[in-house]
Amino acid sequence: MRYLPILAVVIVMTSGTMAAEPLRVGMELSYPPFEMTDAAGKPTGVSVRLAEALAARLGRQLVIENIAFDGLIPALKTRRIDCIISSMTATSERAKSIAFSTPYLRTGLAILAGTRSPVASADDLDVEGRIVAVKKGTTGHHYVATNLRKARLLVLDKESAAVMEVAQGRADAFIYDSLSVYRSHKRHPDTTRPLLRPFREETWAIGLRRDDEPLRQQVDTFLEAFTSEGGFERLGDEFLADEKAFFKREGIPFYF
């Protein structure tokens, strides 16, 4: 298993009294605009803001651990981190080993196809000679590994590498969430086609240890309040204004 270099970032919340133990949140800082770093190398994005708000609500110091996506669940289970806030889909398979908060975002699997690729829908993926790229450890990876028998699976560590395989014609399709497909197509408009309507809908949630029921209850209470106070709407307006407008116009699910 390949891991990215670990970056532990301590963010001190100044409001309220700090608990003795910090809140250690795991995420992979390579998925803008949700988990990323700014020009100065500081964590930012939707998930970072969400983690900051959660830590402030709990009165705990925030520590962000930058961990490769497929290493997040092992890090949670070995108690290196307290929770995962990393655009993680709540799946029945993952729920066998960890707990999830109530969902906070609805999205789904979509397809980035090459301009010369014959793929027009998910029904066109499982064909002899077809090459389908996925990012390791994602629900797209699980879907392809579980459902495709004839196509060749190309597993890559980074989203950008999978996108380039499609853009340069070495893969017929890349399976990922709708927003990522949309943004990848915008970066490669001449060589890719976005098939944005999800062929499988999904929800994102915060990952927690199964034996940490007190934190799960606190997280659910926080999410309910954060939603009712318009927190997610503000994050969407800050980081996803154009995407929100486009997806709403097209009737494609991607919303908090």
Image (tube, rainbow, N blue to C red):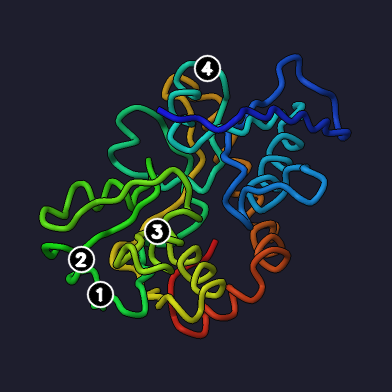
Q: Residue at x 34, y 27 (%)?
A: 97
Residue 224 located left or right of residue 109: right
Q: Which residue is mark 4?
A: 79
Dot 1, how many residues are within 10 Å of its Cα: few (below 14), some (14-19), or many (20+)?
many
Mark 1 to mark 2 CA distance (whole Å): 7 Å
Disc 4: CA contacts within 10 A as few (<14), some (14-19) or many (>=20): few
Q: CA distance from mark 3 to mark 4?
A: 29 Å
Residue 213 left/right relative to 121 = right
**Tag 3 secondary structure:** strand
Residue at image mark 3: 176
Give the answer, above or below, for where 17 lies relative to 229: above
The residue indicated by pointer 1 is: 119
Quick one: label 2, few (<14), some, or many (20+) residues within 10 Å? many
Residue 190 location in percent, x, y? 48, 81
Residue displayed at 54% across by 61% down: 256
> Going from the N terminus, do you reach mark 1 or mark 2 first?
1
Q: Nearer the viewer, mark 3 or mark 4?
A: 3
Question: Can you identify the residue that label 2 sits on?
Answer: 125
- Looking at the rendering, in which quadrant would you find the N terminus? top left
Where is residue 254? Give x, y as percent. 48, 67
Which amino acid, by three-letter code, is at mark 3? Tyr
Of the numbered discs 2 and 4, the one sitting upstream in the chain is: 4
